[in-house]
Image (cartoon, rainbow, N blue to C red):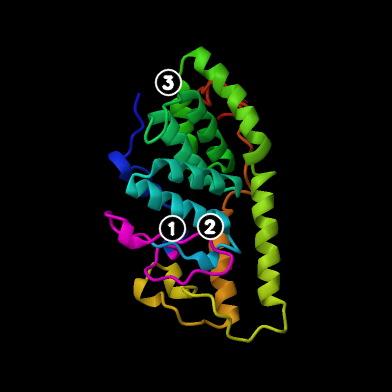
Amino acid sequence: MSLVVGNGRRNMLVNMKPSLWLLLIAGAVAAAHAQPSVSASEDPAPALECNGAVYRFLPGEVNYCLALKMWEKGDYRRGEEFLLLAAGWGSKPAQYSLGLAYFNGEGVAKDRPLGLAWLTLAAERDDPTFKAVMRSVYAAMPVDERGRAEVLYAKLREQYRDDVAAVRAKTRYDRAIRAVAGNAAYSPRLCIAGLNSGALAGDVDAVSQSCPPATQAVETLNKMSEQYFKGWRSRVDVGPLQEVREPEVRPHDPAG
């Protein structure tokens, strides 16, 4: 069974979530808290620039963007590192991308059980696509690989489940937003390059180095965070890896 989407280095790029478009802007100004910048001149592929100004609010988004950039370049080692960092901040797209990469052996050593473990974590918030892929992979695996995946999943959960990673990310986000919205020392016009409502809608022309009002920047960030944490509070934990069964046969199956 193959779950390759597209081909080659572009496989994970097709899985970008809408909020990530805010990060893919040309000429973004790196913030003091940003990750090291990546020069577009070194990239033979179409340039992706990641808005470092977002890092202090949603580091998982920036790390995921950088992972996509590295993957596009064929620098899989660094791409994997950034995906792991993003996964540690509760990024479900990053966890899903790790699952696909390990399962397919794309840019990393092929490890089907490890891929399933990551895909199961990615499905924690009941995203329909992530959950469907996880179930398909599980159904295609022999018993011995399922057993190893169970062990790996239990280990990954210690660090990457929402109760740990998403809580960590939300705590950081809330603290950073309070510093912006509740600090009287800030000017009414807060300079966070690239943060405006047009950028959130994917309007490249709307993304600039101008400084939007603090209220507008916070509004844009809150919309990003809603997408980033979508499904977390209303999620049903997928729990341990289990065999996939039809709901009408086993109506109480937690995987149904």
Tell me the quarter of the picture where residue 87 sits: top right
Q: Which residue in the protein does label 3 denote?
A: 140
Q: Which residue in the protein does label 1 denote?
A: 18
Between the C-alphas of marks 2 and 1, the distance is 8 Å
Are the residues tagged 3 and 2 within 8 Å (C-beta)? no
Residue 95 versus residue 62 in the image, above or below:
above
Tell me the SS state at disc 3: helix
Q: Which residue in the protein does label 2 denote?
A: 227
Q: Return the disc, 2 or 1, that comes first in the chain's sequence.
A: 1
Image x and y of residue 150, in percent: 59, 23
Residue 96 versus residue 174 in the image, above or below:
above
Between the C-alphas of marks 3 and 2, the distance is 31 Å
Image x and y of residue 17, in percent: 44, 53
Question: Magenta segment: does it hold 39?
Answer: yes
Tell me the SS state at disc 2: helix
In the current view of this chain or complex, which residue is farthest to the bottom? 188
Image x and y of residue 228, in percent: 55, 55
Quadrant containing the C terminus is: top right
Amino acid bearing label 3: Ala
- Magenta segment's dominant SS is loop
Between the C-alphas of marks 3 and 1, the distance is 30 Å
Q: Which residues are the magenta region?
A: 22-48
Are the residues tagged 2 and 1 within 8 Å (C-beta)? yes
